[in-house]
Amino acid sequence: MNDIDYSLYLVTGRELLPSGKDYFESLEESLQGGVTVVQIREKNTDTGEFIKIARASKVICDIYNVPLLINDRVDVALAINAHGVHLGQDDMPIAQARKMLPKDAVIGVSCNNVGHVKAAVKEGADYVGIGAVWGTKSKSLTSPIIGVRRVGVMLEALDGTNVKAVAIGGIKSTNLLRTLHGTVSSTGHALDGIAVISEIVASAEPRRATETLANILSGFRADFPHPPGLDTRLTSDLYVTGDLSPETVLEGVVQLMETIRGLNPLVHQITNTVVATQSANITLALGASPIMATESREMEDLAKISGALLVNIGTLRGECFDGMKKGGFFANQFRKPIVFDPVGVGASAFRQETVNELLNTWQASVIKGNAGELAALAGTKEVEAKGVDSVGSGFKDPVSFVKALAKRERCVVVLTGTTDYISDGVSVVSLKNGDAMLGQITGSGCVLGSCIAAFCATAAHLASDEEKNSDGKLAKGDMFLGAIAGVLVLTVAAELAVQREDVKGPGTFLSGLIDTLWALRSDDVQNLAKVSIE
Ligand SMILES: Cc1ncc(COP(=O)(O)OP(=O)(O)O)c(N)n1
Ligand SMILES: Cc1nc(C(=O)O)sc1CCOP(=O)(O)O
């Protein structure tokens, strides 16, 4: 039997009820709010008492036609005629439970890695509970926290099966949309639902807490519908650009260029100390407004008023981490684009761990890096890096690489180099503009991040009303186009800047570049752009 709606799975936890709140009243309110399946979890209760609580809970669930499962205990499930059981890795084996339970009983299994998922499929589980995806205070964990970005490979192991999947551990209304996006596999396999304890049980208003989660889930599903069929695959892509041709790309870029000065978007930049001043000046020259703030205590306020956030880890220090983490968290919460520049990510374990934790916390709209940085992010040794620079001639097949990484990270990826490649995971655009002089000033890659962020803020402003009113996306507007515009504007300006009479070398190039950007017309970009669709 696997026709259960796993969308909003409540696991009970009487010890977490707010003082004075009755357990059965809380359960009923959560059912009224839209819980679709309930698991009774009693870790410190005698068998007799467990059966009593489960039986009374089932009476309430039956009224709402919501299936009830029992945690760990097949005997309790049999005693109250529950719909099934949830088993941990150390509980009764699935085959044994199947023998004891009625034919159509549901059996779910806890999984912490791909091996667990494969075994659960083989042994005939109906669903897997994947956890913990975030840290949780509701249980002392004995297995490592998986992190949102590692759930996708576990879901991929369910491709082609009818085994469903829910994520569990630390899921809150504030991280739910990020959880739903970040867990989608490269094959488009999404979660069937989420399981929570404290977000509902610890609430004084469980009905409202449940409704909030249900609204986020339905917003995500409306924007990324699942087709009917065996797999939970998403039908639509993250950033859908209309017909893609060099002409349509340039039309879009021109529109962004013609909007940015009137809009003057505020671009919040948490960047490195080497390039902060030139990044701010470049942002101003584009017609946007920079704010270079790093203090974690102001991140929520800034996310409300900014058009986009840039996070650049160039001069990463431990004390920057909280600001970066909170900055991205609130940018996701207020649906503002995030441009992430993982500068030198392969250079140290500290950078790698930090990047991993940042990307597990928030969803970037655009990730930009050179070949060495993106290779380190993707976990391939095909391209090596020396500090913040890439070594060698890059990827053998940059088009496939950038597309696969964009698909995996569910965002636009910009691979910089002599040719720049940009992908949204579906299409790849290559741009062949720029000048070698860009390599003679420090931080040209970093200021590119500022340009992309400024145009992503503009693209978000130009999102259709329909898109602005939808709830399922973490950033609205065409981020693919925003990224393309950022790269084109900077690289075309570099070509024009080197031709200026007052530019004699790297020093005058930087000021010439700022002046050229300040005066750049959309005609210049249209005439000089070298755009190809790969
Ligand atoms: C839906 C869901 N997923 C995972 C678990 C964890 O179960 P288990 O590993 O048996 O640990 P305990 O819950 O028994 O502490 C779950 N209960 N539900
Ligand atoms: C019961 C349980 N199992 C987990 C696992 O990782 O298997 S995490 C967890 C606790 C979930 O509670 P909350 O929603 O309050 O974080």
Image (spheres, helix red, strand yellow):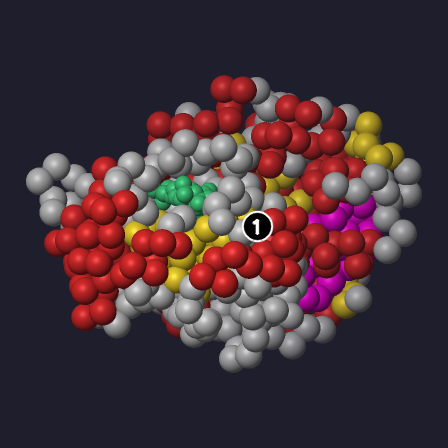
- The span shown in magenta is 414-434
Front residue of 150 and 348:
150
Quadrant, the C terminus: bottom right
Q: Amino acid at mark 1?
A: Val
Q: Which residue is mark 1?
A: 151
Front residue of 107 and 465:
107
Task: Please provide percent x and percent y for residue 476.
Answer: 46, 60
- Identify the residue at image location x=56%, y=70%: 162
Task: Please provide percent x and percent y for residue 312.
Answer: 59, 34
Q: In the visual, does 212 lie left or right of 504?
A: left
Task: Inspect this view and state whether residue 319 appears.
Answer: yes
Give the vertical position of 4 relative to 178 (above or below): below
Task: Please provide percent x and percent y for residue 418.
Answer: 84, 47
- Identify the residue at image location x=60%, y=24%: 316
Front residue of 299 and 65:
65
Task: Please provide percent x and percent y for residue 172.
Answer: 35, 46
Give the vertical position of 520 relative to 159 (above or below): above
| Secondary structure state at the residue bearing disc 1 | helix
